Image: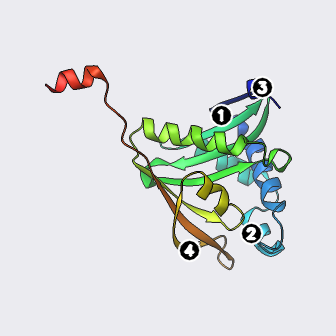
Amino acid sequence: MTPSRLSYRAALMSDAGELIAIHFAAVHSIDTDHYSSAVKLAWSPPPDATRQKWLSDLISQDTVICVVAVLDQKTILGFGIVIPSQAQLKALYVHPDYSGSGVGGVLLQCVEARCREIGLEMLELKASSNAEAFYRHSGYEAVGPTTQQLTDDVSMAATQMVKHFPPIACSIRQRDAAQ
């Protein structure tokens, strides 16, 4: 897969079904050494119309950033979701067929760039145990252990992580206006 065949764009409401399928495939490909089958099922139940509508409604909100990685302008390989008002990365998933190909790293960079553009100075997340090394490699620091509540009865261990963005340098025009 060459980088020229990949593009990154804002998610569309019509992408929701594919994103739910990617989420399901990614979660259920995680080794049971990290999480049990029961936890994975609570984390990502089988795709259905209710989940698809929920995600479509989330994507439609102006207050949410949702970016997708697309191969050859048609096949979605992964996605990332940020809730800017909370400075929270809520989701970053790549289809398991493309895991380890670099798609997730570039997708994370795209999401972070969008966050910096709107003025966020940091981004927090709850990293699953299988993803913690990926986020560390991407510049996130562990704050400490946490849990992610999945259902009323099921939660999973995670690591709270944060990344602070360097300040954006002002342009010459902005400096001239300040003088």
Residue 111 image offset from top left, x and y in percent:
56, 41
Is residue 98 in sight in this rendering?
Answer: yes
First-in-chain label (3 vs 2): 3
The residues tagged by marks 2 and 4 sit, at their Cα atoms, a distance apart of 17 Å
Q: Within 10 Å of the Cα at label 1, are there few (<14), some (14-19), or many (20+) other Cα atoms?
A: few
Judging by the rendered image, the residue that carries numbered circle 1 is 12
**Image location of residue 142, percent across then percent down:** 53, 66
Q: Quadrant of residue 13?
A: top right
> Which residue is at a point 13% across and 25% down the rendered structure image?
179
Would you identify the image quadrant in which residue 119 lies? top left
Closest to the camera, between mark 2 and mark 4, is 4
Left or right, residue 79 beside residue 5: left
Classify mark 2: residues with Cα within 10 Å, few (<14), some (14-19) or many (20+). Answer: some
Calculate the distance from the C-alpha at mark 3 to the C-alpha at mark 2: 34 Å
Q: Which mark is residue 31?
A: none
Instruction: Name the residue that disc number 3 marks.
Output: 5
Secondary structure state at the residue bearing disc 2: helix
**Residue assigned mark 4:** 146
- Residue, x 83% and y 72% (percent of image)? 32
Residue placed most toward the observer, 59 or 74: 74
Residue occupied by mark 2: 42
Kind of residue sitting beneath label 4: Thr
